[in-house]
Image (cartoon, coloured by chain):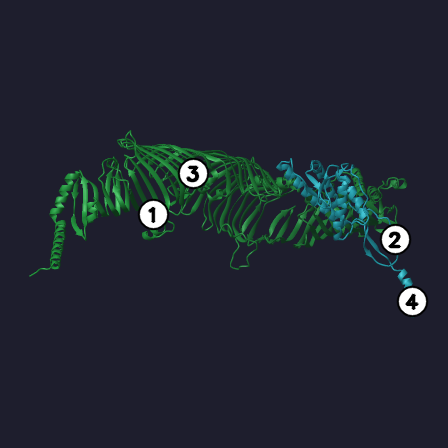
Chain colours: A green, B cyan
Amino acid sequence: MKISARKVFVTAGAAFLLLLVLCYAALHIVVRSDWLRVRLQSELGQRTGQELQIGGLRLDPWLTFVVSAISVSRDGRALFQANEVACALGPIDILQGRIRSLSLHKPVVRVPLREFFKTSGGASPQISFGALNIEDGEFVLETEGGQAVALRSLFLSAKDVSLGGTAGLQLRAYLPQLGGTASLSLSGRATAMQAKIVIAQAEGKSKSRILERAGEKPVFDARFQVSMKETGKYEFNGSGNIDGLRWGGNEAFTGKFTSLLELDAKLQNALFSLDLETPGFPSGRLPVSLAVGAVKAQVNAHYSAAAKTLAVKQIKAISALGTLEGQAAVSLAETPARITGDVRLRDVAIDSLKPLMPDPLRRSTYNGKIAADFKLTGPYNDPAASGLAWSDGAKVTGEKLSLSSLSFKAPFQWSSAGLKIKAAELRGKELSFGKKGEMQIKADRVSVTSDAGKAGPGPMEIAAGFDIADGRFANPEGTRIGEHLNAKGRLIVSQRDGETFVKGEARTESLEMLWGSFFGDFKEQKPAIEVDGRYRAAAGELTLDKLRISLASAGSVEIKGRIQHLPDDPTFNLEVRSDDLRHAGFYDFFIKDTFKIGYPILGQIGATGRSSFTLSAQGALGSFTVDGNLRLAESVIQEKAGSWRVGPIGLDLPLKLRFPEAAKESSNETAPVGKLTIQQIQTQSTKIPAISAPIVLWNNSLRFPDPIQVPLFGGAGSIEDLAWRDIIGAPRDMGLSLRLDGLRLSDLTETLGWYRFNGTLSGSIPGVRWVGESLKSDGTITLDAFGGKIAVRGMEIEQPLSPGRSIKMTAKLDGLNLEQASETFQFGHISGVLAGAIDGLVLSQGQAAAFDADLHTVEKSGVGQRISVEALNNLTVISSGNDGGSVLGGIASFFDSFRYSKLGFKAALKNDILLLRGVEGSEGKEYLVVGSWLPPTVNIVSYTQEISFSELLRRLERIQKTGGAQSAQP
Amino acid sequence: MFKKFLLVFPLVLAACVTVNIYFPAAAVQRAADRIVEETWGDQGKGGAKEPPKSGSLMRETRYVSIGFVSEAHAQQPDVNVSNPAIRGLRESIKARSGSLISFMDKGNAGIGRDGLLAVHNTDGLNLKERSEVQQLVEAENRDRENLYAEIAKANNFPRERVGDIKAIFARSWTDQAKPGWWIQDAQGNWKKK
């Protein structure tokens, strides 16, 4: 039997294959055996001097050795851990001393800093990897002090990696904080290694890491030269570019840097310097949003492992915002590390700090610099700063605000717990507030001393004292002007629960103010304002706990309450009260001094007394109600020269007023009744005793429900139905009726400064009413005088509120005893009875301006008609202007008096021309006196009918000079 | 009958009464000149006074005319500018003139084109003086307006003639203004006299 070669070959091949399978199976069994695992642990531990722990070994097809749960440690300190390490070998690779691929799953490498360089500097095994993969690794660099720097989520995918050779190392890590990946490339030998770090970020934001990787672009590219000097020092010299690096937000950082790190041989000290330049600092990373702009920064630092301190010898940053310089020391021995440092800020543009300012201040432009020196102390992640910030000569301009020179000093303490500013001083010159075309407020100097503070992120609380020197204000029309304003005050402003609380006071040392027609010099008045209130901006609600305005001479007014819907549609519920409003001060300051040029009589009147009121005002500006109570006490109004005096006046008046118009009549509303008392009305010759009357001011109607009884000149006056129907809507619409009963004319005429005569005055005016510009009356006043009656009717006062007012009336005379009248007026002796009428009598400026009179004697049985020589002479003087003495000489001089049959005249006065006609006219002659047919008799004939007012005055003066005492008794 | 009528008609026409009532501008002007002179004394003597311009508002104005015959013009009597009200106003104006003239000398007050006073310039015045000149001007203008109304009333001029009186007085105030005082022209421009 011949065995073929083919069969032998197949049999041998099968045997070899079987052997191979058996060997592979044996290898598989051996690899998985505890024997090998223990052997490896022991063998490798002895060779490396480290402790090796292997959880399991297996062989994956074909020659991939997988070690699971592996850990390497030395002296109990873990150096390396991994969930799984897979090492793939190939037959050729083994021959070449090469590992085809090495994969580590979740490896953690802990390297002491010292060992890192030792390892690099020592002999490296000549092992190369066809591929090196690290999946989700972690690299921890441990410093001497036990501090650790960890790089997590590392992914490495390297090919042709040669340890100790020059082929290089590619390390790639995902950095979740940056949302990108970092790649580290190392090349060269350990003594002169080049490192390249590239960070790439996705342009868009994605939750998928895989997608992020796909869209990434390099944003950080740095190269470092790592070398070990002959001195044993290690030097890391590098530079790099940053192009749109983002962290913690969308803001990108761009710039370039150079850095140098020197480590001494013992790795005890490290010197670090960094020069950084960026065209735009990512200010969004700052606690406040500031436009920092381009920045050039230098940092020099020294780390001492022995002292565990990091000394920042110099930090300097120059930007458009300003310059920062400083030094700091960080103690790493404490946890957390503690920092102490000095920082100097210079040339910080105030304008760039607008984001830190309250909204109204942000609208201005600031031309000036601010500087600050402060110390930093405390934990590095929450330091506190204390120091001084100041500025000098800054200029502020805005739409409404300008300040030519602003200087301040603000000592401050700041920490995350809050901010405190103590005794800050702010001084400004040439302050101007207000736009052109609006009210402008200016001040030469303004100073503020302020304490301010805030707790944590809470709102600022400010307590400030202010001083305004030589302030002024003016509206464009120049009708509202204030000058020489010097005021001081104190204000506390705080915020809580959405409300701004304001409390303070202001005192005006001096102010001259022109407000329309009003001028006031407030220097003696010392006006003061106290305010205590709060404002809720969201609701537009202002609550006034107290607003007190006071003047030294006039007293004070206090307002409490609430104003809602500010600023557009305010409604209010306010209580306004004054306990001590002094009339003298108020009248002199606000009324007399303001209007006395236009109305000189006001300068001759004085007012004294006090008043108080409590008023409640409710509603909106367009429609509101005022109700409350007004009290006057010891109030006196008097003519300064003492010719008349009214008072003391007392008033207790409940009131309700509605603006702009009264409410419709409400029968349910009962108007409360007040009381008016006037203790006395006094003239130089007359005293009118006390008057008391109930008074009602309700729903805009002012009325005296009961008659006002006035004891007057020995008789009585009664004013009835005195009422103003609507003092708001129609203040002139008033009415009254008047009764006069038995007034003694002797007292009345004396009071009026007339010729004194006896008699009484009685009458009734049932209605006084406004018609156009006139106050008109009906009814009749009757004077029982000179044995007859004078009936006055149709009294009318034209423009009663004007200084040029005139009084019109008509009088009818009946049965006047001429004997009494002529003696009273010192005209000489005339007997007879006079009757007639004076129509259209107008009194203006205290003089008769017009009348049309027809007065004549009437015969009455038992009454003789005689006229004395003196009276004849006076009549002659009046009618002709000449003395009648020459005419009445001769035979006439033998008689004291003459009989007459008629006496009288018709006279019309208008425009200062008196047209005088006689009681009879005949043949062009006007007879003032017609003689009787029985002698002695006399006629007086007037030829000059028109007499001018000045001539009439001259003639009357002439009569008076020749007359006797004016106060002749009838 | 018709013939008789034709004969009589021209006679009737010729016999028609013609009543001419004129607004006596010249007389008012004379009165205004007197009052202004009384107020300012010799202050304005240096000013050239121009005669009333023909065709101006100040010319003699007829406001009632009946008839077809030629009208005879009698010499106009002076208008009345004296009664207690007018006297009171004139005295008030005169009493105030001393204070006002010092402000007008300084250019603080001037004469407006309507003859009323106006605050022209407050430079150099403190607030009290500003208030004073303002109040003086207001009081003066109030009195002047009342004066014109009273003159119209005293002379039975219709109420509408108050404006004419005011214009006539404006001319007097301007003509008799002292050289150096500020005066507003018809266009509203202020000029020194």
Chain ID at mark 2: B
Chain ID at mark 4: B
Q: How many marks?
A: 4
* Mark 3 Cα shell of 10 Å, populated few (<14), some (14-19), many (≥20): many
The residue under label 1 is: A180
Which dot, 2 or 3, sits closer to the camera? 3
Disc 4 is placed on an element classified as helix
The residue under label 4 is: B6
* Residue situated furthest bottom in the rendering: B1
Disc 1 versus disc 3: distance between alpha carbons?
Answer: 25 Å
Disc 2 versus disc 3: distance between alpha carbons?
Answer: 102 Å
The residue under label 2 is: B72
Whether discs 1 and 3 lie on one chain: the answer is yes
Marker disc for residue A295:
3
**Residue A517 locus on image (x, y percent):** 62, 42
Chain ID at mark 1: A
Mark 1 or mark 3: which comes first in sequence? 1
Chain ID at mark 3: A
Mark 4 or mark 2: which comes first in sequence? 4
